[in-house]
Amino acid sequence: MIQLNTERLIIYTALREEMQEIIDEQNDDMLKKAYREMLQGALDHPDQWEWYAIWIIERKDGAKVGNLCFKGLNGDGSVEIGYGISAEYQGRGYATEAVDAAASWALRQPEVRRVEAETEPDNKASQRVLEKCGFIPAGTTGEEGPRFVKTL
């Protein structure tokens, strides 16, 4: 298990049982499907668990505020990050703190050259998180919307 510590947060890779619990508790069908795919990716690539697993974002007082993930490690040295903060914890800087820590960690790994992300076109809050973390617009659009990139 990998664990990152920030000023207010502990961010760590979920174990199989924790991932299954998150899947079982999820009511959104699209998220449930995505989480199942993450778990399957982690099981298919146990030596690269951190690149497929759900990462839990927890405050230091134990409150779980959200999660993030990488969407596999690509052969070109890129990883894509996704993240979400529970509605009751949004607007407090937790996403920025978590994404910054996770992207910085990823870029310290020898096989990673860049971290990518994409947001819904209207999700200005998520785009602002990426900008605060040093991501820049990539000039391309993915399935969800505009893409951003961060390199060393």
Image (tube, grey):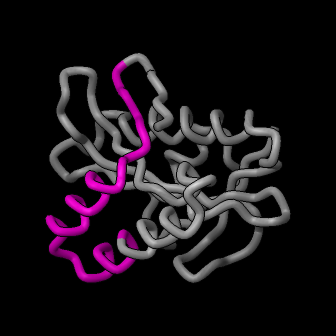
**Front residue (pair 61, 99):** 61
* 146 horizontally vs 91: left or right: right
* 52 horizontally vs 32: left or right: right
* Residue 126 in view in this figure: no
| Residue lying at 76% horizontally and 58% vertically, measured from the top left | 78
Quadrant (top left, top right, bottom left, bottom right) of the C terminus = top right
Look at the image and say whether residue 34 sits in the magenta stretch: yes
**Front residue (pair 135, 124):** 135
* 56 horizontally vs 131: left or right: left
Residue 121, position as x, y percentages in the image: 51, 72
Task: Reply above or below: 117 against 61.
Answer: below
Task: Choose top left, top right, bottom left or bottom right for residue 75.
Answer: bottom right
Look at the image and say whether residue 26 sits in the magenta stretch: yes
| Residue lying at 50% horizontally and 62% vertically, measured from the top left | 42
* Residue 113 in view in this figure: yes
Residue 108, position as x, y percentages in the image: 74, 33
Residue 142, position as x, y percentages in the image: 63, 78
Tell me the chief SS of the magenta region: helix
| Residue lying at 41% horizontally and 37% vertically, measured from the top left | 12
Task: Reply above or below: 38 against 66.
Answer: below
Residue at the top extreme of this rendering? 7
Range covered by the magenta-colored residues: 8-35
| Residue lying at 45% horizontally and 72% vertically, measured from the top left | 40
